[in-house]
Amino acid sequence: MSPKPDAELSAGRAKGLVRRVLREPLVHFLAIGAVLFAGLTLVKSLERPTVRLDAQDLNQLASYWEVQMQRPPNKAELQGIIRDRIDEELLAREALRLGLDKADMIIRRRLAQKMAFATDDLAQTAEPTEAALQAYYARTAQAYAAPTRVAFQQVFFSGDRPHGGAERAAAQALQRAEEDKREPQGDPFLFPLAYEDVGLQDLLRDYGTAFVKALETAPLGTWQGPVLSPYGWHIVKVTVRRAPPAVSFNSVRGQVRDAYLAERRAEANAVFLRDLRKRYRVVIAGVPED
C-alpha cells in the first residue's frame, strides 16, 4: 500500500487547522498587538533625545584644555574630554527631567543672572551724540569731581555713657565752649581728634553719613554739634574747607560715555522686567500682587 494518500491527508488536515486558527479573533488581536508594539518600539527609538557635539563644540573643548594645561590634548585625552562633556550633558538633562532644578536657590539665581546678561546684550544702545554726553555730564558732574577736603577738630563723647549721657555731655560742652570761649574737653578716642587735610569721602567709612554732612555744611571756625557717629557723639570745628577743582568734560569723557550707556541699559532692563511682569500672575502668601 502506498503511504502517499496518508501524507496528503495529514497535510490537508494541517492546512485546515491553520485556516481555522487564522480565522480566530484572538489570533487577529495578538497579531495586531505585535505589529503595534513593534511600531511603537521603532518610533520610540527614533524619538530618543539626541546629544550632539559639532566641530565647534569639539574645538572649544580642546581650546579650554589647552588654556588650562598649556598644551593641546592628545587623542586619548580628547576622547576623555568628549566623554566627560557627554556625561555632563546627560546628567544635566536627566536632572531637569526629574525636576532637580526646582526650588534650588543657586540654580534660580544663576539663571536669573544669565537672563539679565542676555537682556543687556539685547538692549543695543545707540552710540550717544556729543550733545547727549555733554547734557548727561552737566547733570552728573558731581560724580566726577574730587571730594571736598577739610581741616577740623573734634571732641568725642563715648556712646558707652549710660542713659543717653553722651549726647547731653556733648551739648553741655558745646554750650560752655560758646559761653566761655574755651576748648571743650571730652573722652579719649581711637581716631585723631584733629585732621589737617582729609577728603570727606575718606571719612565716610569710619564716621558715617551724618558726620560727613555736618562737616560739609558747618560754618567755619565755630564749634558745632552734637553730631552722631557709630561710636558716640561729637562736637566739631571746621577750620578749612576746600571745594574740589572743576573737572573738564574732555578729561572724563570716557567715564561719562560708560555711565551714560550703563544708565540706558538699566532703563531698558527695567522696561523689559516691567513687561515681563505683565506675562505672569504673582501671588504672595495667597494674595495677588496686583
Image: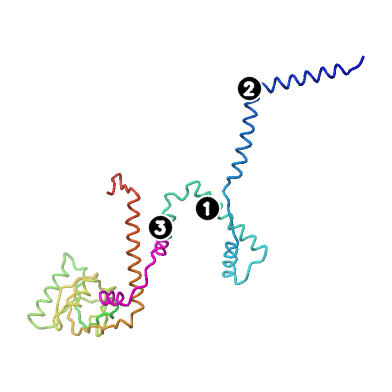
The foreground one among 159 and 253 is: 253
Residue 121 sits inside the magenta stretch: yes
Question: As shown in the figure, which amino acid type bears the numbered disc 2?
Answer: Pro
The foreground one among 136 and 59 is: 136
Q: Is residue 203 above or below residue 75?
A: below
Alpha carbon separation for disc pair 2 and 3: 60 Å
Q: How many marks?
A: 3
Image spot of residue 132 (x, y percent): 30, 74
Q: Which mark is residue 112?
A: 3
Mark nearer the N terminus (2 vs 3): 2
Q: Which residues fall within the magenta stretch?
A: 115-141
Alpha carbon separation for disc pair 3 and 1: 18 Å
Q: Which mark is residue 92?
A: 1
Mark nearer the N terminus (3 vs 1): 1
Q: Residue at 28% of width from left, 74% of height from top?
A: 136
Question: As shown in the figure, which amino acid type bears the numbered disc 3?
Answer: Ala
Alpha carbon separation for disc pair 2 and 1: 48 Å
Q: Residue at 20% of width from left, 79% of height from top?
A: 154
Label 2 sits on residue:
25
SS category of the residue bearing label 2: helix
